[in-house]
Image (cartoon, helix red, strand yellow):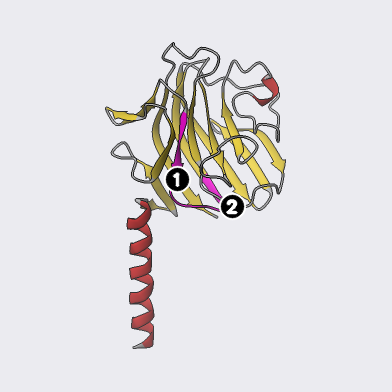
């Protein structure tokens, strides 16, 4: 009886957690945060025009983030994205302020091929881990894998490790997808996400 009661309680807790954060499990420990159908797992921060078109999560105007409602400590994020060479975007992890998101309050895994400082362009962890040579993501679909385990951070783009660091500044927090205006605030420059998954470590 005790074992059955424990199993029922654990099952109920797991189900409650899944419903509360709108994160569905897909096997192998992976949870799907965005699958082309909805953005219930996120809160909007800023004025970026996030929308779903033909199963893609798109923003091409404004400046802002989609910030997960759930907080994470150790994990791997696997995200598929399409960017132009001048798209300014990224994945911000372990954010410690839900209203003030940036490289100072999170780790920023960058997406920006034409960044003036190329050492922290696409694949780089801004102000934490440089890329050399800088990989290019513009004009195609890419797969980003972001790993955070303790103070160990790894950036992998299209199956190739491009940046790595040990840094213990940020220990836990939600993660965010970014759309940034850049210098040109009038030209629509899109970031598109096709799938976003996370696996706790």
Residue at image position (55%, 37%) is: 101
Which residue is disc 2 drawn over? 172
Mark number for residue 68? Answer: 1
Residue at image position (48%, 40%) is: 78
Quadrant in which residue 61 is drawn: top left
Q: Position of residue 93 (x, y in %)?
A: 56, 42
Note whether 138 is above or below 100 in the view shown.
Answer: above
Residue range corresponding to the magenta coloring = 64-76
Residue at image position (46%, 34%) is: 65
Name the element at disc 1.
strand
Q: Quote the CA–CA distance across marks 1 and 2.
A: 12 Å
**Quadrant of the frame with the C terminus:** bottom right
Name the element at disc 2.
loop
Of 87 and 183, nearer the camera is 183
Quadrant in which residue 196 is drawn: top left
Q: Is residue 65 magenta?
A: yes
Quadrant in which residue 11 is drawn: bottom left
How crowded pointer 1 is (Cα within 10 Å; few <14, some 14-19, many 20+) is rated as: many
């Amino acid at each position: 009886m005790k074992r059955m009661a424990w199993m029922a309680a654990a099952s109920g807790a797991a189900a409650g957690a899944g419903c509360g954060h709108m994160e569905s499990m897909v096997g192998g420990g992976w949870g799907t945060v965005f699958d082309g159908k909805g953005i219930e797992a996120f809160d909007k921060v800023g004025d970026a025009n996030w929308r779903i078109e033909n199963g893609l999560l798109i923003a091409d105007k404004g400046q802002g983030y989609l910030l997960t409602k759930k907080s994470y400590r150790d994990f791997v994020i696997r995200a598929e994205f399409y960017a132009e060479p001048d798209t300014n975007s990224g994945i911000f992890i372990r954010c410690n302020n839900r209203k003030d998101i940036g490289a100072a309050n999170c780790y920023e895994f960058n997406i920006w091929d034409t960044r003036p400082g190329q050492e922290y362009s696409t694949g780089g962890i801004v102000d934490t881990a440089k890329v050399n040579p800088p990989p290019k993501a513009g004009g195609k679909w890419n797969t980003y894998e972001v790993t955070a385990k303790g103070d160990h951070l790894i950036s992998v783009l299209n199956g190739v490790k491009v940046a790595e660091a040990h840094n213990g500044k940020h220990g836990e927090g939600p993660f965010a997808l970014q759309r940034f205006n850049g210098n040109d605030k009038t030209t629509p420059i899109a970031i598109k996400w096709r799938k976003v998954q996370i696996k706790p470590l």
